Amino acid sequence: MAVTANAHKWMFGDFVVCYFLIGCGLGLLAGMITFTSVYIYCVVTYGLLFGLALGWLPSAILAATVCGLTILLWGPVALLLIAYFVIQFWQ
């Protein structure tokens, strides 16, 4: 069997999978940073007893929200940032 140059054509589903894989990586990173920073904020604000015992709850809720939004919206945000910096560069 001969191998042709067009052995694998990119389909729309391939781009969607790549978009969500990149989003999952960025979302995981953003979620971990959010969880850690909100947990530290809760400990500092509410003290060791309440902060350590109950700080994980708002931290987990906010981290899950940030993670989900990052997975879905990283592309448009990246395009807006690129457009902003191009406009600032040309002024």
Image: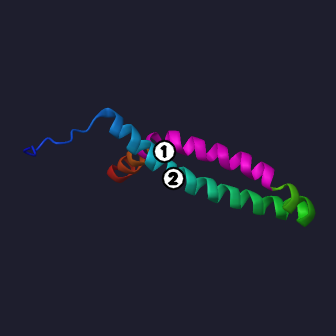
Compare marks 1 and 2 and give the one earlier in the sequence.
2
Q: Is residue 63 magenta?
A: yes
Q: Residue sitting at 78 percent across and 49 percent down?
A: 58
Specify start and end residues of the magenta stretch as a single range: 56-79
Indicate left or right for 53 with 71 as reference: right
Q: Residue sitting at 91 percent across and 59 percent down?
A: 50
Q: Is residue 16 above or below residue 81?
A: above
Q: Quadrant of the N terminus?
A: top left
* Mark 1 or 2, closer to the camera: 2
Say which element carries label 1.
helix
Furthest-top residue in this view:
12
Residue with the mark numbered 1: 74
Colouring scheme, one of rainbow, by chain, secondary structure, one colour: rainbow
Indicate left or right for 43 with 5 as reference: right
Q: Position of residue 35 (x, y in %)?
A: 69, 56
Could you tell me the amino acid type at mark 2? Answer: Leu
Label 1 packing within 10 angstroms: few (<14), some (14-19), many (20+): some
Say which element carries label 2.
helix
